[in-house]
Each structure stands twice: as C-alpha cells, then as structure tokens.
C-alpha cells in the first residue's frame, strides 16, 4: 500500500488502467487556453475536474501536475475512510464523502475497492472514554452511525486485540463506526482520471506551475508553466504540501504548516485483521490491505518540514504500541516505510473556497484527513469553482475564518485525525 517512488508515469498508468485504454492514453500537450485549470493531479484535483465536467458542463479543463498522476500523497496514504467527526461542519463534509464512497465504483465504472469493514477507536483512559462517548452522542444527533463498545465487545469485533488489564495500554472501551472502512489507496486517482479524461479533460503531467498571472484588475488571467503559458480565468489550487508556495505566486499568504507523516506496511500474511483500529493515546492505527500487508500509520512529526522521511523515533513509538495492542503481530517483518507531506491549518480543518484574488480558488489544509474526503472535496470544490460561490457544505471552511475567529477546531476532536 506504499507510495510509488521509482515507477515511471507510463508504467504506473499501464499498471493502473491496463487494457486498450492504458495503451492509448498519453499526457497531452497543454492548450493555449482553458475555461479552468486545476493545479494538482492527485485525488482531490482529479475529482474536482471530473465533477466540473460531469455536473457543471465544463469540458475545456486542464489538470496540471509537476510530476505524474497520483504521485503525491494520493499514492502514499493509508486508505482509511470514516465520517465520525465531532463538529457539525466536519461531520457534514465527511459524511457527504462517505456516501459518495459507497457508490463511487459504480459512478466511475472503476473498482476503487471500497470495503466498509468498520473503524474502531480505542479508549485507554477515562479521558478517552469521555471523549469518544461524546463523539458517539454527537454523531447520533447528526444522523451518523457510531456506537460504544465494551472491551469484551471490542475483542469480539477484532479478535487479535489484547484487552488484558495488565498491559501498558489497557482497552477500556471503543467507539465503532461500522460504515467506515478502507479503499484502494491510489485507485481513486486512476478512477477519477479515466472518467474525467473520457469527458474531455486534459491531464497534463510533468507540467510545473511556475507563476500565476493577474490582470490590471487583479483577477487571474492564466498560469505560467514549464511547458509554456496557459490562459484561463479560473485556477483551482489543490496541491497538498505545496499550497503555500503556489498561493504566494499570487500574493496570497496561507495559514499552513507542512509536516512529514509516516506509515509502513508489514510482510503480507493471510487475512487476520477484520477492521481498522485506531488509538488516539498512542497515535497509531492499523488495518490489513487486500494484499495481506498490515498497514500501520503514525502521527505527524512535531517539527514542520518538507521532508518525506520524518523522524525514525515516531515510527518506532507507533510500532511499540501496535505490538503491545496486538501481541500476535510481533513476529511480523516490516516490508517498507514511507513519508508524505501534509498541510495543516491552526484548527486542523481544511480550507475550501474563494481567495482575495478573483478567479483563484484553493482547496488545502486537510492534514491527515485528505484521503477519506476525496470525493466530497472534489464535489464541493467543483461547485464552488463553477458558480464562483461557496458550496453550502464548503462554506464554513472559508479562508476568512482565521480573521473572524470562527474556527472548526478538530485538532483534538478528530482522534488521530486519520
């Protein structure tokens, strides 16, 4: 489930799409002008282009990426999907996303391997118990499924879990969202790419944006790229880890910090892990991929960085906790580990919508919650770009909230935020 680090773009596309479509597809030369340009060919950017074309009738669209399709965080995520967030604004967008995930393979005619196997969040102390019970009550009030389990019920749902009281991280209970689960980590990019391309969207790889052009009135007039200038009146920036750099080209400062986020996978084994298990106290989470690997994720590093490696002590702390909670996994060998770069806002909630520059739109700051939000993120961002007005679900996540103080503080409420 790790990210692609050495494959060519052509090889990745051949592997992902296969068949006649994979043989015929190529990264086109960019046109001189487009109705809209999306910067970033990850899951969110490709989803935005697809919904612009399929729901808003904009077909003359380009998705630009300085690398290859799906080569950023989309190829490095750890697959978790859930909507059991605390605040109404967060719950609304993640529940919208979960509902889209449930029918996404049919909508794209591409198997994204969505598996609603359940996401269980462990409580190790009384603070955890109170926090997750609060989540359960809030979610039920929002019409979102979530339930409280005793330690014995958690053991029945996930047999490898150790619920002994003499361990370092005793399990006092758990919150379970049965509709939560996983999907293939990069299939969402390939599915949206193929569907968008079929609608006429140009996906231009190896095309780095080096500048954002503006007219005398300050509005966007186009972008400068390593493959020449492109005229457009609408630019949507959806480039995780690089948003601040791109927005600075238009003179917009962003309230973002970038952090390394690490994950790893074990050697593949036969199916043994029936669900996703997360622990806020130890900042660890684990599930099993369809290939049999145990997919293990850690928290973000403490210090901001553009490094895709991160500190080894973070992963080691996570592994120690996983081996404590699941003693039968101690004999597994680590297959590979990797790091991504995540943009985080002060309230750990995303920014979606308009900017002070007319024609410039931004979608960023998802932190570690980006993968699960992919369909909804693209859906509401496309509506915002097409209409020039914030989609109702996206409206609370405006950039202006950092000036007014109307924050959506999911920093502590989102468990480990994955």
Image: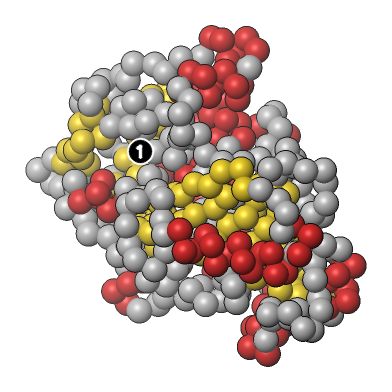
- Image: 202 above or below 384: above
Q: Can residue 333 be seen in this view?
A: yes
Give the position of the C terminus as an image quadrant.
bottom right
Q: Residue at x 35, y 51 (%)?
A: 307
Say whether residue 210 is left or right of residue 141. left
Q: Which residue is drawn at 75% across and 64% down?
A: 326
Residue 241 on image: x %, y %? 36, 50
Q: Which colour scheme is used?
A: secondary structure
**Secondary structure type for disc 1:** strand
Q: Is residue 48 visible?
A: no
Dot 1, how many residues are within 10 Å of its Cα: few (below 14), some (14-19), or many (20+)?
Answer: many
Quarter of the image for residue 17 reads top right
Instruction: Please give the residue where the numbered disc 1 appears in the rendered image.
Output: 39
Q: Which residue is drawn at 57% across and 18% down?
A: 14
Residue 274 on image: x %, y %? 82, 54
Most foreground residue, 327 or 221 = 327
Query: Hey, which residue is sitting farthest left in the picture?
Result: 216
């Amino acid at each position: 489930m790790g990210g692609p680090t050495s494959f060519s773009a052509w090889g990745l596309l051949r592997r992902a799409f296969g068949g006649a479509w994979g043989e015929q597809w190529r990264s086109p030369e960019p046109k001189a002008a487009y109705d809209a340009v999306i910067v970033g060919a990850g899951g969110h950017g490709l989803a935005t282009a697809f919904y612009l074309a399929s729901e808003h009738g904009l077909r003359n669209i380009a998705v630009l990426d300085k690398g290859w399709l799906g080569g950023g965080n989309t190829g490095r995520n750890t697959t978790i999907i859930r909507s059991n967030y605390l605040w109404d604004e967060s719950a609304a967008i993640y529940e919208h996303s979960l509902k889209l995930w449930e029918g996404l393979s049919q909508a794209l005619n591409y198997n994204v391997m969505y598996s609603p196997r359940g996401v269980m969040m462990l409580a190790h102390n009384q603070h955890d118990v109170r926090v997750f019970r609060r989540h359960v009550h809030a979610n039920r009030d929002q019409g979102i499924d979530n339930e409280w389990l005793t330690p014995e019920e958690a053991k029945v749902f996930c047999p490898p879990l150790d619920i002994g009281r003499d361990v370092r991280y005793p399990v006092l209970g758990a919150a379970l969202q049965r509709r939560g689960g996983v999907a293939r980590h990069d299939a969402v990019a390939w599915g949206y790419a193929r569907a968008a391309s079929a609608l006429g969207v140009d996906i231009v790889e190896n095309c780095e944006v080096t500048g954002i052009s503006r007219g005398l009135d300050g509005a966007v007039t186009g972008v400068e790229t390593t493959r020449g200038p492109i005229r457009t009146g609408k630019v949507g920036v959806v480039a995780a880890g690089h948003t601040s750099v791109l927005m600075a080209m238009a003179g917009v400062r962003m309230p973002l910090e970038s952090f390394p986020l690490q994950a790893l996978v074990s050697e593949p084994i036969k199916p043994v892990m029936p669900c996703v298990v997360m622990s806020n106290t130890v900042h660890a989470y684990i599930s099993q991929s369809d290939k049999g690997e145990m997919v293990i994720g850690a928290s973000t590093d403490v210090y901001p960085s553009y490094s895709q490696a991160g500190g080894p002590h973070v992963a080691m702390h996570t592994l120690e906790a996983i081996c404590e909670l699941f003693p039968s996994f101690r004999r597994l060998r680590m297959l590979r580990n990797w790091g991504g770069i995540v943009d985080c806002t002060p309230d750990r909630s995303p920014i979606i919508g308009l900017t002070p520059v007319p024609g410039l739109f931004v979608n960023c700051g998802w932190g570690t919650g980006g993968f699960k939000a992919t369909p909804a993120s693209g859906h509401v961002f496309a509506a915002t770009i097409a209409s020039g007005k914030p989609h109702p679900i996206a409206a609370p996540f405006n950039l202006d909230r950092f000036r007014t103080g109307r924050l959506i503080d999911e920093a502590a409420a989102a468990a480990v935020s994955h």
